[in-house]
Amino acid sequence: MDSIQELEFTSGNPDRPPYTESQALDPLGVDRFMQILPDLTRSGQLDVILNKLRFITENFDQSNCASIPHCFAALRDFDFLITSAHVLGANSYKGIQRLQEILEVLGRLTDHNPRGCNFTYGLFNPEDDRMRTFTGLNEERIFIHAIQKGTKGLDDSLLTLKRLSMVRVDSRDFEYLTDEITIQFAPMLPAVVEVLRKITPEVFSRQIVRFFVPLDINGKTYPGITGAQIQNVCIDLIVYGANSYSEQYYSYAARSLASMLPFQQSITRQILQQLQQTSLLNKIERDIALCENIDSAQAITSLNSLQRFLRKILRFRWAHRRLAQKNLPLRKKELGSGGYALDLLDDLIQITRIASLRIDQVKADLSIRNGG
Ligand code: HEM
């Protein structure tokens, strides 16, 4: 994988993800069981969890997947049960007949991996006392709330990027839309700071993250919950990532994009088509080089806005790197749940900084053209 043209997108349903509808649903009838799941796991009662899974599977019928929101809610709840069972007894869920087939059907209907992910753990998870957790710890609730608060505006930021890809850099609209996306991204920083302040690395890396594991479903391995499954990967790709950077970046982007929901994949594909398979930054550079009648003053103001957005991403990434740096040494292998090490986070910081430096260069060229 060394270019954007090789990235694969699903052709799935481009509707906005039904987070709120799924949060309210309990298609497997496990609301009460979910309250005791952490205790069952802590006391090693694998049989009780497997019996529950067997009961749900035997009684699973069409009404459990009556709509897409039902299917996402079912994937969410299966994932808590299956992963808890797997942590107590590796692959123990595989002994339950029809379970993996049901997961594959749910995966097909939602155009998603046949298991849960960062979205089913975060935005599809009820926010009140029906919240599903693996451990029942207050720290895990804080973590889930942080993901929910941080990522809530990120689908909107993709829609803003779509509008941004259609306007000229020397327009007021470009400046306003870039300010809007900065606001939509902003909650990511306090989300990470809250986790830094309130969750010790011991609790996160020893007690919570052990549930963020890959699962094998009918012979194929699917990744567990990871921050790599957050819309940031789409934002990077659209704004500057579509220019060839490191091999590691492209393989991370391709893998993470495959875990995005159909909506995010569809919007990203549409934007890249609009940009003719290049990044927004490339398009800006090309437009400015080719266009005679640029309003340089407005273009520079717009580019300042774009740099403010990049600074916001960088501030998130620096704080988040601190979080990873404190946590990873506590793990058997110094890796995140997505299988990446600190150097991936450094790569992402680096490409964000390079993008900002390129904007400095564009602004300098514009000033020269403007005679100043
Ligand atoms: C103690 C808590 C955390 C640790 C140790 C951690 C660690 C990591 C690691 C190692 C990665 C690389 C991918 C992987 O291997 O999984 C990653 C990616 C990521 N994480 Fe976290 N993370 C934590 C909390 C959070 C929180 C609270 C958020 C946001 C609300 C977040 C957002 C992201 C994002 C967006 C990425 C993709 C890389 C990027 O865009 O910079 N993480 N995380």
Image (cartoon, rainbow, N blue to C red):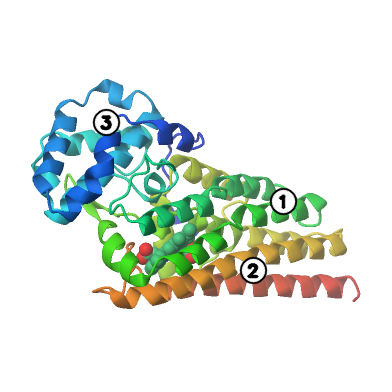
Residue on which the image places disc 3: 28
Residue on which the image places disc 1: 177
The numbered disc on residue 311 is 2
Q: Position of residue 56 (x, y in %)?
A: 19, 31
Give the residue displayed 15% in from the left and 43% down from the top.
49
The image quadrant of residue 88 is bottom left
Are the residues tagged 3 and 1 within 8 Å (C-beta)? no
Q: Circle 1 — which element?
A: helix
Q: Is residue 183 visible?
A: yes
Query: For the N terminus, which image quadrant?
Result: bottom left
Q: Is residue 220 visible?
A: no
Q: Amino acid at mark 3?
A: Leu
Of 185 and 306, which appears nearest the observer?
185
The image quadrant of residue 139 is bottom left
Badge 3 density bin: few <14, some 14–19, many ≥20, Cα 10 Å = many
Badge 2 density bin: few <14, some 14–19, many ≥20, Cα 10 Å = some
Which of label 3 and label 1 is nearer to you? 3
Between discs 3 and 1, the one toward the N terminus: 3
